[in-house]
Image (cartoon, rainbow, N blue to C red):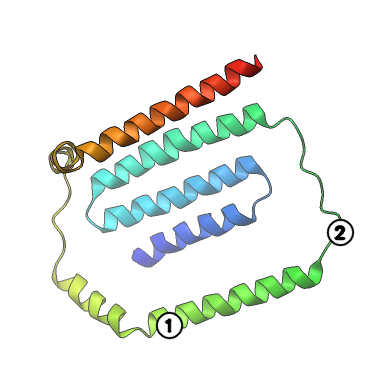
């Protein structure tokens, strides 16, 4: 199952990078987020998986697509000339680096040790009570700073838009 969710995440990320249409790129981002949610489920953390789907796949991507559709007033300029040698050379380098990474990871002694240890001990599932206790006791300052940062970003965005109106 890990391999399936990892491939879904990877496929969404790769498709996102190579996509020219911004709306389709946003949908590829949703695919990537869904794969990450599946990985959270494998880690016995259904709360994080649900938050990943609701917050990222839902709210953030809808906001991103709304802003892209709202502000996309001009078309992108085409490239001055085609560079097929650079394109194929970059693909070859990426494939060589990817093959090297796969070889290093699959031949890793540490990975085999982690796999053996993971089968023996599964973590306790995360519940909303545990998340709330950790968020509002150990991480309260970070939670408040993130809220203030988001508020400042929203006020700045409104100020930029209102200045043009």
Quadrant in which the N terminus appears? bottom left
User: Which label belongs to residue 89?
Assistant: none
Pointer 2 residue: 81
Judged from the image, the secondary structure of the residue bearing numbered disc 2 is: loop
Give the residue displayed 66% in from the left and 76% down from the top.
Answer: 92
Quarter placement of the C terminus: top right
Which residue is labeled 1 in the image?
104
> Residue 54 vs residue 77: left or right?
left
Residue drawn 49% across the image and 37% down it:
61
Say whether disc 1 or disc 2 marks the residue closer to the N-terminus.
2
> Tag 1's secondary structure?
helix
Q: Residue at x 25, y 47 (%)?
A: 46
Q: Position of residue 160 (x, y in %)?
A: 58, 23
- Image: 81 above or below 78: below
Query: Image quadrant of residue 140?
Result: top left
The answer to whether 60 appears left or right of 129 in the picture is right
Residue 56 rendering spot, x and y as whole percentages: 41, 40
Q: From the viewer's side, name the closer residue of 76 and 127.
A: 76
């Amino acid at each position: 199952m890990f391999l399936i969710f990892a491939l879904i995440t990877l496929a969404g990320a790769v498709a996102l990078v190579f996509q020219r249409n911004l709306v389709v790129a946003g949908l590829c981002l949703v695919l990537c987020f869904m794969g990450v949610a599946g990985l959270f489920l494998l880690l016995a953390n259904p709360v994080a998986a649900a938050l990943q789907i609701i917050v990222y796949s839902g709210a953030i991507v809808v906001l991103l697509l709304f802003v892209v559709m709202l502000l996309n007033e001009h078309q992108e300029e085409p490239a001055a000339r085609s560079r097929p040698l650079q394109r194929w050379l970059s693909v070859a380098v990426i494939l060589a680096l990817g093959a090297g990474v796969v070889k290093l990871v699959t031949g890793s002694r540490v990975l085999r040790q982690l796999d053996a240890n993971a089968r023996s001990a599964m973590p306790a599932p995360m519940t909303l009570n545990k998340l709330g206790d950790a968020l509002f006791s150990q991480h309260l300052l970070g939670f408040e700073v993130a809220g203030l940062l988001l508020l400042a970003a929203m006020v700045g965005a409104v100020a930029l838009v209102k200045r043009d109106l």
